[in-house]
Image: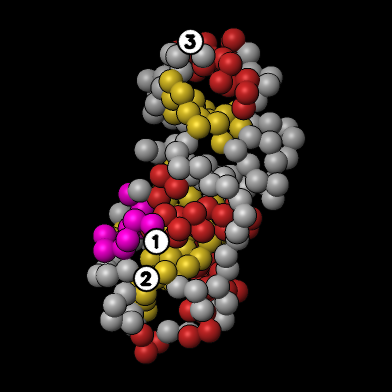
């Protein structure tokens, strides 16, 4: 998939406005447990009631496998199980059918070293709320010089356990001012952690 084309289409859609989804509680961390834990079955059944002892046994046998196993509910909007590197993850879903992504997920993607912790927390909460509502999220981050970074995350429709991310630098003279009604602020620049090619940054929901 050519992410640059997707980014361009979404950027045009968002031109002139700032999208913020409020009200949905975003957890700090994944809801997860070791496959070897004595409570692995109970934990899994809390997420997906039809999980069996056989399922958990199979996950233990494949715990050293680097591939991710997913077990999805047939009911839209219900949570699902992901098993990766010896851990069971319960992925909670929004009523719109998108995963509710914890704030810790953003570590190792796009970061702003000079941003105040409470602002960073608010930005990541905003990103997850938007992703849960629409499958993509967008925000502006301004530095002390008036320049900005346009931040975009979106869920891969063909691989829904992966999230793509892009950080686009924009000089202050090129900023579309109507889009900056509620920007986030930082001191200094942005740090982009690359995974793949320059235009294909993505991270698995189960990568820590």
Which class describes the residues within 10 Å of circle 3: few (<14), some (14-19), or many (20+)? few
**Residue in the image at 38% along x and 57% along y:** 118
| Magenta segment main secondary structure | loop
- Residue 170, relative to residue 125: is it above or below? below
Q: Nearer the viewer, mark 3 or mark 2?
A: 2
**SS of the residue under disc 1:** helix
N-terminal of the two: label 3 or label 1? 3
The magenta region covers: 108-118
Q: Are marks 3 and 2 in contact (CB under 8 Å)?
A: no
Percent x, y of residue 24: 61, 51
**Mark 2 sits on what residue?**
185
**Residue in the image at 56% along x and 14% along y:** 41
Q: Quadrant of residue 199?
A: bottom left
Q: Are marks 2 and 1 in contact (CB under 8 Å)?
A: yes
**Residue in the image at 47% along x and 68% along y:** 139
**Mark 1 sits on what residue?**
119
**Mark 3 sits on what residue?**
38
Instruction: Give the side of residue 197 with respect to residue 48, left or right.
Output: left
Q: In the depicted view, which residue is nearer to us: 97 or 113?
A: 113
Q: Quadrant of residue 174?
A: bottom left
Instruction: Give the side of residue 73 with respect to residue 118, left or right.
Output: right
In magenta segment, residue 73: no
- Residue 140, relative to residue 72: is it above or below? below
Percent x, y of residue 117: 34, 56
Which class describes the residues within 10 Å of circle 2: few (<14), some (14-19), or many (20+)? many
Q: Quadrant of residue 43?
A: top right
Which class describes the residues within 10 Å of circle 1: few (<14), some (14-19), or many (20+)? few
The answer to whether one can see residue 196 in this image is no
């Amino acid at each position: 998939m050519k992410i640059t084309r997707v980014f361009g289409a979404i950027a045009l859609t968002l031109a002139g406005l700032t999208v913020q989804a409020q009200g949905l509680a975003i957890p700090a961390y994944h809801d997860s447990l070791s496959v070897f834990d004595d409570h692995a079955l109970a934990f899994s059944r809390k997420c997906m009631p039809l999980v069996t002892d056989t399922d958990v046994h199979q996950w233990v046998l494949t715990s050293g496998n680097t591939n991710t196993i997913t077990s999805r509910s047939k009911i839209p909007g219900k949570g699902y199980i992901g098993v990766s590197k010896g851990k069971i993850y319960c992925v909670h879903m929004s009523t719109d059918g998108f995963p509710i992504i914890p704030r810790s997920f953003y570590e190792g993607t796009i970061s702003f070293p000079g941003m105040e912790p409470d602002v960073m927390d608010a930005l990541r909460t905003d990103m997850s709320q938007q992703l849960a509502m629409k499958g993509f999220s967008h925000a502006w981050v301004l530095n002390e010089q008036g320049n900005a970074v346009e931040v975009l995350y979106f869920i891969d429709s063909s691989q829904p356990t992966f999230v793509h991310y892009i950080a686009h630098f924009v000089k202050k003279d090129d900023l579309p001012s109507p889009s900056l009604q509620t920007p986030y602020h930082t001191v200094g620049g942005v740090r982009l952690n690359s995974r793949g090619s320059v235009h294909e940054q993505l991270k698995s929901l189960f990568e820590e």
